[in-house]
């Protein structure tokens, strides 16, 4: 039976500081004879005004670290560094949309004969039509052990809990958030007095290699999907964006933001 590359569409958020680290590895390492990136869609982070996002991040990081992070963000913007620019340089088409649940966008996924949608920090909930559009389904990468660390900022919550490792999980996507079957995991060791910055960057880079491994377990010709382990959502917890008390507990463990 003749083979053909797996046709993949990537949906992600516009983050020139952390999520971009995933794509620096992923775009450079993806085996093009076996995986064809047919589109990359980059959405606005948080889907809220920029000043609201800035206020949220300042409360989380504190004023000093926020200013340091802001300086990094400005340098990245001035340099033109972005996920979209990385995609274009690699020769992958950038496909814009105001929302990934737009019927026209969903139809374009079907028309492009996409096998798998890959979600990397996608800022929108995928509704049923989008989940059903690719032939072999949608998969997501999550920087936390599932179902124990469902939700937002799983790297932070694992460090705050005193875990020995931050677990990166690739799972099937379902209508319920972080609830599909687990396809692959890896453990990224944490250090005493670690920094959130180091761990996020490290898990993004390691996660890119894990994502390639997971995609290679799909077969575009036979329609075979990777074996997955069902997730018992009731056995885990769902975390939201950290509040000041949780940040204080994180720092009390000796960890730092940057």
Image: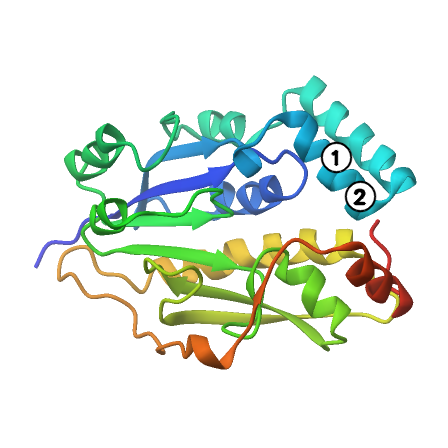
Mark 1 Cα within 10 Å, few/some/many (few <14, many 20+)? few
Residue 46, horizontal then vertical, whole percent: 56, 38
| Secondary element type, mark 2 | helix
11 and 56: which is toward the camera: 56
- Residue 124 position, x and y percent, is 44, 43
As drawn, is 208 to the left or to the right of 221? right
Tell me the quarter of the picture where residue 41 sits.
Answer: top left
Q: Residue at x 84, y 66 (%)?
A: 249
Q: Is residue 30 visible from the viewing direction of this image?
A: no
- In the figure, 147 relative to 88: above or below? below
Tell whether label 1 touches label 2 (CB within 8 Å).
Answer: yes
Q: Position of residue 220 (x, y in %)?
A: 19, 55
Task: Mark yes or no: residue 1 visible.
Answer: yes
Q: Residues within 10 Å of mark 2 (few under 14, many from 20)?
A: some
Q: Which residue is mark 1?
A: 55
SS at mark 1 in the image: helix
Quarter of the image holding residue 140?
Answer: bottom left
- Asked if residue 195 is positioned above or below residue 94 in the image, the reply reads below
User: At x 61% / y 57%, what residue is drawn?
Assistant: 240
**Quarter in which the N terminus is drawn:** bottom left
The vertical placement of 85 against 112, above or below, is: above
Residue 80 located left or right of residue 112:
right
Percent of width and height locating residue 99? 37, 32
Mark pair 2, 1: CA separation: 6 Å
**Residue 59: which numbered mark, if any?**
2
Q: Residue at x 66, y 61 (%)?
A: 155
């Amino acid at each position: 039976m003749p083979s053909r590359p797996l046709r993949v569409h990537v949906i992600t958020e516009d983050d020139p500081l952390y999520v971009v680290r995933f794509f620096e590895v992923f775009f450079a390492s993806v085996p093009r004879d076996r995986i064809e990136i047919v589109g990359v869609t980059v959405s606005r982070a948080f889907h809220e005004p920029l000043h609201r996002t800035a206020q949220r991040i300042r409360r989380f990081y504190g004023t000093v670290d926020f200013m340091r992070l802001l300086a990094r963000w400005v340098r990245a913007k001035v340099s033109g560094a972005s996920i979209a620019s990385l995609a274009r340089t690699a020769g992958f088409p950038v496909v814009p949309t105001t929302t990934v649940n737009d019927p026209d966008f969903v139809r374009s996924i079907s028309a492009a004969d996409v096998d798998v949608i890959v979600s990397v920090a996608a800022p929108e909930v995928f509704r049923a039509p989008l989940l059903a559009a690719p032939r072999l389904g949608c998969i997501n990468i999550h920087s936390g052990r599932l179902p124990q660390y469902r939700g937002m900022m799983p790297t932070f919550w694992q460090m705050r809990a005193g875990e020995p490792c931050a677990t990166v999980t690739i799972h099937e996507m379902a209508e319920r958030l972080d609830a599909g079957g687990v396809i692959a995991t890896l453990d990224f060791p944490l250090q005493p007095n670690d920094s959130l910055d180091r761990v996020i960057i490290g898990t993004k880079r390691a996660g890119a290699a894990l994502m390639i491994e997971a995609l290679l377990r799909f077969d575009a010709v036979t329609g075979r999907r990777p074996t997955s382990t069902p997730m018992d959502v009731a056995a885990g917890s769902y975390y939201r964006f950290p509040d000041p008390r949780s940040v204080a507990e994180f720092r009390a463990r000796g960890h730092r933001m940057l």
